[in-house]
């Protein structure tokens, strides 16, 4: 079956523009996570959805970042007024059940965002 | 503060040599520990988790609560083990399962 997909795979934008990154989780997966990975660092948690409910957004760095998952499936991470420091790999992951440490997270290929 | 530290950015060994990728963590509660791996041009994927006490692709990892470590070991490295390895933790009773990752270690196995 298809794994987690993300689009676009690469996004180059100019400072000040808004960008929307899409994640399509594995069908039937309840949990969805967004992580951000700067060059040379490990992934850093941004936000978590249980179905359509955003249950943890503690990792979103500021109010320019928002995420939604309106129908409990596809999710969009939006960054408004992008800045050069937003340049990173944005990773999405999904897992079958709601939260919990025992649930394996399956990662997508990531979206490489470059802000000029 | 919750933190995972992987002190080596790069570990280079010859094929057949033993491998140990170090991971230390700082966490006040009862964490669950994982190793994730990313092979070239592939996705980040789970390698093993401490609760399963399993050996995957010849790799094992033992949780040492006294030393707050979760080092990944393999007795005889293979060229196909070359990849980026990330140690990660989550809270043992987490209701979200969010992961805290280390900085990663690149393992290079030379022929």
Image (cartoon, rainbow, N blue to C red):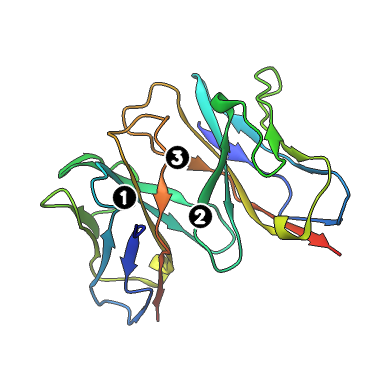
Dot 3: element: loop
Q: Name the residue that disc number 3 marks.
A: B99
Residue B5 position within the rendered picture, expressed as x and y whole percent measured from the top left = 63, 40
Instruction: Tell me how far mark 1 sits from mark 3, CA to CA.
Output: 14 Å
Quarter of the view holding residue A1: bottom left
Sort mark 2 into few (<14), some (14-19) or many (20+) by Cα contacts within 10 Å: many
The foreground one among A106 and A56 is A106
Label 2 belongs to which residue?
A: B44
Q: Is residue B25 left or right of residue B77?
A: left
Depth order, front residue of B53/A21: B53
* B14 horizontally vs B28: left or right: right
**Quadrant including the C terminus of chain A:** bottom left
The mark found on residue A60 in the picture is 1
State the image coordinates of residue A40 (x, y, percent, origin top left): 59, 60
The answer to whether B91 appears left or right of A83 in the picture is: right
Kindly indicate whether the residue at mark 3 contacts the one at mark 1 (C-beta within 8 angstroms).
no
Residue B102, position as x, y percentages in the image: 58, 45
Q: Return the residue nearer the eye: B17 or A43.
A: B17
Is B100 above or below relative to A9? Answer: above
State the residue at coordinates (50%, 19%): B30
Instruction: Report the chain holding disc 3.
Output: B
Question: In the shown orientation, is residue B15 left or right of residue B26?
Answer: right
């Amino acid at each position: 079956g298809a794994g987690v997909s993300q689009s676009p795979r690469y996004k180059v934008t100019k400072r000040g523009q808004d960008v929307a990154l899409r994640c399509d989780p594995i069908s039937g997966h309840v949990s969805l996570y967004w992580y951000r990975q700067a060059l040379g660092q490990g992934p850093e948690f941004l936000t978590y959805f249980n179905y359509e409910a955003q249950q943890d957004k503690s990792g979103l760095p500021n109010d320019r970042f928002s995420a939604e998952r309106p129908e409990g499936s596809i999710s969009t991470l939006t960054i408004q007024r992008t800045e050069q420091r937003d340049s990173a790999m944005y990773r999405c992951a999904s897992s079958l059940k709601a939260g919990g440490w025992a649930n394996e997270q399956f990662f997508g290929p990531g979206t490489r965002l470059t802000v000029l | 503060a919750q933190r995972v530290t992987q002190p080596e950015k790069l570990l280079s060994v010859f094929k057949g040599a033993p491998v140990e990728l170090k991971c230390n963590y700082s966490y006040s509660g009862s964490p669950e520990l994982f190793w994730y791996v990313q092979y070239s041009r592939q996705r980040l994927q789970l390698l093993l988790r401490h609760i399963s006490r399993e050996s995957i692709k010849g790799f094992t990892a033992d949780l040492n609560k006294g030393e707050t470590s979760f080092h990944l070991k393999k007795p005889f490295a293979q060229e196909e083990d070359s990849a980026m390895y990330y140690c990660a933790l989550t809270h043992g009773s987490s209701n979200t399962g969010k992961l805290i990752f280390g900085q990663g270690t690149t393992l290079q196995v030379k022929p």
